[in-house]
Amino acid sequence: MGESPRHFTADYVERVTLRDGTRVVLRLLVPEDKALLEAGFARWSPESRYARFLTSKTTLSADELRYLTEVDQEDHFALGALHEARDGTLPVGLGIARFIRLPELHATAEAAIAVADEVQGRGLGKLLFLRLCAAAAERGLERFRCEVLGSNTGMAALIETIAPERTIEVGGGVMSIEMALPNVTPTEPPETIAQEGSMYRMLKAAAQNTIEWTSDALRLWRRND
């Protein structure tokens, strides 16, 4: 029997309204999104930029823009959220969710979510998380991995609270946390997923700078040369 048709394809478009009434369009990233991504990055706070790149950074290079937008949507998947353009106004990027499959572990991928500062706390991160999990499952993934710095003395306690059922390997001050994908549908309403879901809290903590990515996780945001 053949595989079920995929939901998250080049034709995927989803329109949603956030809790504050902001109208958002979700779709897969395309190479033509470079200018949109560059403009969105410029609006991020310095703290949000540092959380992704582990350095003070004000612009994205041409190589980084190519890496972030010219993806195969199979092993490197990227989903974007845009403020819906109206009355001739230009679209504005509000968030990105992406995963990159680990070549040595075909059913596992590293994952990350970034939400623009001005719409944090309005439900967009949770929605992106659900859609990222569903897209990953369509592509044969079973687990997400997050690698964070473990040098902070309170890190172990934080991880224990966020993901008590986690799988952790510690080495060189790094914590590698793997969690099974939740069983969600491609159209799952955000309110059906408990806020205390371990993987969601893990990615949310990273997005809010509560925990810090390792340098190895930079492959989510730029090419490792």
Image (spheres, rainbow, N blue to C red):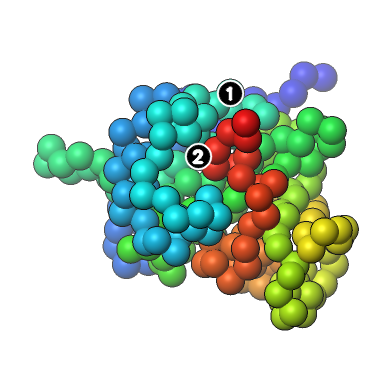
Which residue shows up at 78% across the image and 60% down it?
174
Res. 6 in view: no
Instruction: Look at the numbered discs 2 and 1 and tell me whether their residues touch, using CB distance below 8 Å.
Output: no
Q: Report the amino acid beneath label 1.
A: Asp
Residue 84 versus residue 209 in the image, above or below:
above
> Mark 2 sits on what residue?
79
- Locate the N terminus by quadrant: top right
Residue 126 versus residue 220 in the image, above or below:
below
> Mark 1 sits on what residue?
72
Which residue shows up at 78% across the image and 41% down it?
108
Residue 137: give its label. Answer: none
Residue 114 versus residue 193 in the image, above or below:
above
Q: Earlier in the sequence, mark 2 or mark 1?
A: 1
- Locate the C terminus by quadrant: top right
Depth order, front residue of 7/131: 131
Res. 143 in view: yes
- Measured from the top left, where is residue 169 in percent x and y? 87, 58
User: Could you say whether the residue bearing mark 2 is in a helix, strand or loop?
Assistant: strand
User: Could you say whether the residue bearing mark 1 is in a helix, strand or loop?
Assistant: loop
Quadrant of residue 192 in the image?
Answer: bottom right
Q: Is residue 82 left or right of residue 127?
A: left
Q: Report the amino acid beneath label 2.
A: Leu
Depth order, front residue of 147/71: 147
- Measured from the top left, where is residue 63 in percent x and y? 46, 28
Which residue shows up at 84% across the image and 33% down it?
104
Q: Is disc 1 surrounded by few (<14), some (14 to 19) or many (20+) residues within 10 Å?
A: few
Q: Is residue 17 left or right of residue 194?
A: left
Q: For the residues marked 2 and 1, what is the alpha-carbon distance in whole angstroms? A: 12 Å
